[in-house]
Structure formats: structure tokens, C-alpha cells
Image (cartoon, grey):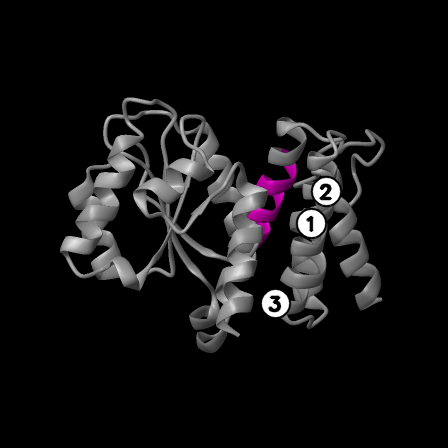
Amino acid sequence: MKEDIIALLKENVIQGRKTKDDEGADGNSVGTPAVLELTQSALESNLAPEIIIEQGLTAGMQVVGDKFAAKEYFIPDMLASAEAVSGAMDILEPYLDGSEAAAREKFVIATVKGDIHDIGKNIVAILLKGAGCEVKDLGIDVPTEKIVEVIREYKPDFLGLSALLTTTMVVMGEVIEALKENGLRDKVKVLIGGAAVSEEYAQEIGADAYCADGFQAIKVLENFQKVRV
């Protein structure tokens, strides 16, 4: 029975069904339990939150990522799944004990000063949350001083910087320099992304990684975790 709930949860993540009222990718599931209902059922069946996250939510999003990479899924499909997982994480949050919460990767994300584009950033934030990260989204047009302040106080494992414009991508380098000046650069891994930037630019400004999309960001995090282990 417990295995059935997890299998259904994973499948509904793949289908992008957040609640029982959603049709999903196959269009034939309205009225049946979806991600939120199944997450609650899993908890009521005494399944551990980490099992629900790893075997249901994260496993489902991995399939979605594969489908997205293969161009079987497009941004609306991916977003539907990510939003469903984000809702499930909200349900699970109170059930994560202190040790589990402490073990979660902390990720700060922001669109840099002068740039008001947020669609890409929002997608990445949802995917990271669905992958089990504790995400603090600072929003758009975020001053460098604010980012530095949050890094100092929140002490995240990762900082994600987004910029869509060539005129604002330079601010990413300014943020990294400000982190150095404040003795914080070696405290956080810096990932950059957005239409204006590239792998070469990441290396040029001294970022730790370039991420083309949210799924690549998750893979980068996994690689950093393996290195630490």
C-alpha cells in the first residue's frame, strides 16, 4: 500500500497534477488524488518525509527533466510538475525534524540590480525547492549590498544569480567581488544563469558554475554534494 502511494505520487508529479481537479498530461485523471492529496495520504500512512521527497517527488522530477531535455515536455509542462512539487514541499515542511532541516541545502537566488526579469529565476527556484532545497528568493533588481547582507546573515550553501540583459550581467561580477571584499566568497558556491551569460562568462568572473536551466542547476548541486562526500 505504501509503495502504491509513492508510485502514484511519482506518476502524478510526471503528469503535472497538483490537485485532484487537474487533468494532467494524459487528460484522463480529473477527480483522482493528485500530488497534494497523495502527499497527505503518504504522511497519514506514516511514510517518512525523506522517502516521500526522494522516491516520490524528486524521482518524478527527474523523469520530467529527462522529458524536458528530450523535448517531449515544454516549459508549461515542466512548470506544472514543479509547482505541484513545490506545493507538496509546503505540506512536508512541518514534518521535517531539526536534523533533516539542517541537512537541506540552503540556496539564495536573485535577479541582479538593474534587471527585472524573473521568469527563469522563478522556474529555477521552484525546481530547487522541489529537489528538497531550502530556497530564499530575493526577487528582482536586487542591490549587490542586499545580496552580500543576506549571504552574511543566512549563510547559504549556494547563491544563484540571474540576468537576462548584457547590460546587467556585469553586476554578477560585481557581486562576486563584493563577496570577496567582505570575506564571504569562500563561504558560498556561486551559480549564474540567464540568457545573457555563458560557461565562458562564469569562468571570466570567477563563478563556480553556469546553469543553462533549473535542471542543470540541480545536477550542479548534486555534483558539488558528491565532491563534499
Q: Residue at x 51, y 36 (%)?
A: 123
In the displayed structure image, the side of residue 13 where residue 141 appears, left or right:
left
User: What residue does disc 2 label?
Assistant: 66
In the displayed structure image, the side of residue 228 where residue 3 appears, left or right:
right
Q: Nearer the viewer, mark 3 or mark 1?
A: 1
Q: Is residue 203 magenta?
A: no
User: What residue does disc 3 label?
Assistant: 49
Residue type of the residue flagged with mark 2: Asp
Pick the quarter of the image with the N terminus.
Answer: bottom right
Q: Residue at x 53, y 53 (%)?
A: 220
Label of residue 174 in the image:
none
Instruction: Locate residue 169, reporting x and y percent.
Output: 31, 30
Above or below, 94 relative to 29: below
Task: Give the mark, 3 or 2, whose residue is nearer the N terminus.
Answer: 3
Residue type of the residue flagged with mark 3: Pro
Task: Please report contact status of discs 2 and 1: CB closer than 8 Å, yes or no.
Answer: yes
Count all numbered tags in the image, as a single digit: 3
Magenta stretch in the rendered image? 80-88
Question: In terms of depth relative to the viewer, which is nearer, 196 or 217?
Answer: 196
Above or below, 150 relative to 169: below
Judge whether residue 21 can be spotted in this image.
no
In the displayed structure image, the side of residue 191 where residue 172 appears, left or right:
left
User: What residue does disc 1 label?
Assistant: 62
Above or below, 72 relative to 6: above
Q: Residue at x 46, y 28 (%)?
A: 119
Instruction: Indicate the quadrant where residue 89 lies.
Output: bottom right
Considering the numbered disc 2 on the image, is that residue within a helix, a strand or a loop? helix
